[in-house]
Amino acid sequence: MKTSTLVKLVIILVVLAIFGAYALPTFIGKQRAKELPSFLPKSPINLGLDLKGGMYLVLGVETNKAVFAQLSRAANNLKKQLLNAKIAYNRVYVDKNNEIVISLVDKNDLQRALDLIQTNFPNYVIVSEGPPIKIRLKEKIEDKIKREAVDQAVNVIRNRVDQFGVTEPTIVRSGKDHIVVELPGIKDANRAVRLIGKTARLEFHLVDDSVSVDEALNGKLPPDDEILYQIKRDPTTGEVTKIPYVVKKDVVLTGDMITNATVRFGGPLNKPYVAFELNSEGAKIFADFTAKHIGKRLAIVLDNTIYSAPVIQSRIGGGRGEITGNFTLQQAHDLAIVLRSGSLPAPVKVLQKVTIGPTLGKISIEKGTKAMIFGAAAVILFMIFYYRLSGLLADIAMAANVLIILGALAMFNATLTLPGLAGIALTVGMSVDANVLIYERIREELRLGRSIHDAVNTGYSKAFITIFDANITTLIIALILYQFGSGPVKGFAVTMSIGLLANMFTAVTLTKTVFDIVLDKFRPKRLSI
Amino acid sequence: MIEIIKPDIYIDFVSKFKVAITISLLLIAAGIISLVIQGGPKLGIEFKGGTSIQLAFKKGIDVGELRKVLSSSKLFKDAKIQTFGGTNKRFIIYTKKSTSSTTKSIEEQLKKVLDKQFAGQYTILEVNMVGPKIGKEFRDKGLEAIILSLIAILIYISIRFQYRFAVGAIAALFHDVLITVGFLSIFGYEFTLDVVAAILTIIGYSVNDTIVIFDRIREKVKTNRKLSNVEAINRGISETLSRTILTAGTTLFVVLALFIFGGHALKGMSFALLVGIVSGTYSSIFIASPILLLFKGQLIPEKKEEESTDRFKQRIEFDMKNLRER
């Protein structure tokens, strides 16, 4: 045997051994893979959600709301600074175009106000020097707020999912303001969506008892107050009642200062409630505030809904509090999770949701595999029938190709989806194409009266450039497909790409090496082709 | 040796170009008529937004009964019901509605409606909800991917071959995409993401097929400069015919297996592949190659120029020699 042939043979065997080792756990199952020697890989191929069941969720972060919140804070801050500088204002508010509008009482204060804004609000540009003055966030800063809102939302959601207890979740940002969440094997998808999607903005507001609720509802609402509702559900009839409260707009404390939240049981019916702890800063604010407002009511507001509004009996030190409501155990449990993991910087919307039950995944695997086996069997038999031993060799190359695809999927931790399975099947059909090209060429050369040795060599070299061209174009398509596709379609592009690359190796290098060895060793008079 | 095509066969494909293009145009027209009648392609949930919910009942039920229960609710009044598997056990319910709320879900509301009549008799296998915003994104991206693929192919073939080959290949690709889209419409298949993936794969497959033939045509011209363009094309196609048929055959085996055994989830995709592969094989022979003739001049003229320079040198040398001898 020539040295170059020997080297090729060794390379082929090593490559197949490596990919085979990675593919092995998928064939024998996770349990038995554990008993393999320690140097061998043990994880089987990741199955996509469409094959093992679970939930795929695309959320859109309403980043504009995060920007609006930032503007509102700035507007409040500006009011305080204007007062400190003794500049009287009629109104300071955020308008529809995300601009802060400042209308002053006295025109002569205009320049002083502009100076103050310029020195103390470097993140803003003055749109109009007024009156009224209009300022807006610099574009760069606005983009940054949006970007950070999405990043923060990803972190918060990851926290929540981790505490919810899902194995191998994926939470990634996608594009500008989308978040993709994949929860394999999740049973109660809707509960998970509720948990993930809860904004969970916890705020404490003082109830304004000086205003009658009826008058406030009829439009006599003081500018510093707002109306919020408590929602009560009758446990037997399921009837919902909304109770309005007039509360101060000023926020006493927010959920950002919560360090821990747990489910407890108490009250006459031993019902679940959520107890929380504040950090030292929050504890101090809480203690001072409660000391000053004994006898008044404090509304605990979550996402603009009042959960309870207990009367402050005494100064509450130690930074502990509780949220009671008509919770089921599950609701209390989930509320504790969202309080612990923090609030979302902006509300999220469900843009796409796919939930697949585990049974459907099993059916898909069965049917996909069955189709693949039937298709492959037909191809294998046909190749042997048509090209005899050479056909068998092409079949071996095809099997090696599938082995490499499976091994590569496991190696790169890629995901096998149902369209991915179809991609493998298609590769099976197309991978023999290279061998068909070569064999047809060899037959032609033989017909021209060349020796077996020459015919094989020219056959391979003449067919190679065609195989190369054809594979490259298909590879280009597969790459574009990968760019464009969502989960399952990406899987299709991945298996196709690996299959095409592997094809160059198995259908050309592998089969040629075998030919070389056979021709060299046995010097056959006739070629079984 | 088994041969489906006789080795020394020579078929005059070019002369059948007119017949072929008539057939193709008729098929494409049929597809377009079907698309027009149906008001455009039947888009899947991914592209138009909405919700599909797949149900499995323990026992076969009456579809009419299911329809009655659904029509009693406001949300599912306009829902479409599709049954498959032939046992009246599995259904897909489509509605145009979707919800972006994180607290309410459509399937929970469906459950409420169904439980009035079928409580405990069914399970929800799959829920697929796509909001209108994402639907538009998918539409844009899908179209972008198809256009991008065509451009990439055009560039690659222009580099590797002459531009006239690229025009032929692209014409064949348009042919295949139109035929596939038309057939999908005629046979009532939906356009889903999988189907778009299949269309892209068809583009890849068809180019692959076309390249094999083009390579052979080019080789014919290179080895025998006296060959006319028509003859070179006919020979190129004839000599690769057995390969073309064999590869289409093996690929069709597999795709047919996917279509028959792959289950509901792979039906649309494998149908598109089935049509596309047949069309791709046909178009490589009858569309891509004859188009090369629409351009005047020899195939691969660059090479000829080089040779003519050589010949020019020879002629000069020859003349010089004659001069000297004189």
Image: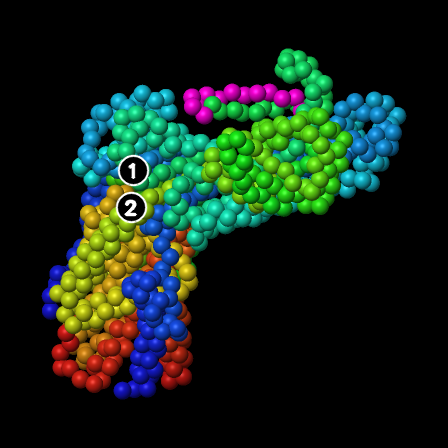
Q: Quadrant of the C terminus of chain A?
A: bottom left
User: Most prominent secondary structure in the magenta stretch?
Assistant: strand
Q: Are marks 2 and 1 in contact (CB under 8 Å)?
A: yes
Q: Quadrant of the N terminus of chain A?
A: bottom left
Residue at x 68%, y 29% (from the top left corner)? A312
Disc 1 element: strand
Residue at x 27%, y 26% (from the top left corner)? B117
Task: Decide: is A111 above or below B213.
Answer: above
Q: Residue A359 bears which disc, if any?
A: 2
Residue that protrudes farthest toward the left in the picture: B2
Q: Is residue B69 or residue B163 the one in the foreground?
A: B69
Residue that protrudes farthest toward the front in the picture: A268
**Left or right: where does residue A66 sit relative to residue A210?**
left
In this view of the protein, can residue A401 be seen by the observer?
Answer: no
Q: Name the residue carrying label 1.
A: B123
* Residue A428 painted magenta: no
Quarter assignment of residue B303: bottom left
Distance from disc 2 to disc 1, alpha carbons, whole Å, reads: 10 Å
Task: Decide: is A424 above or below A76.
Answer: below
From the top left corner, tell me how far across and down residue B13 is, in percent. 20, 53
How crowded pointer 1 is (Cα within 10 Å; few <14, some 14-19, many 20+) is rated as some
Residue stretch rendered in magenta on the structure? A235-248
Q: Amino acid at mark 1?
A: Thr
How crowded pointer 2 is (Cα within 10 Å; few <14, some 14-19, many 20+) is rated as some
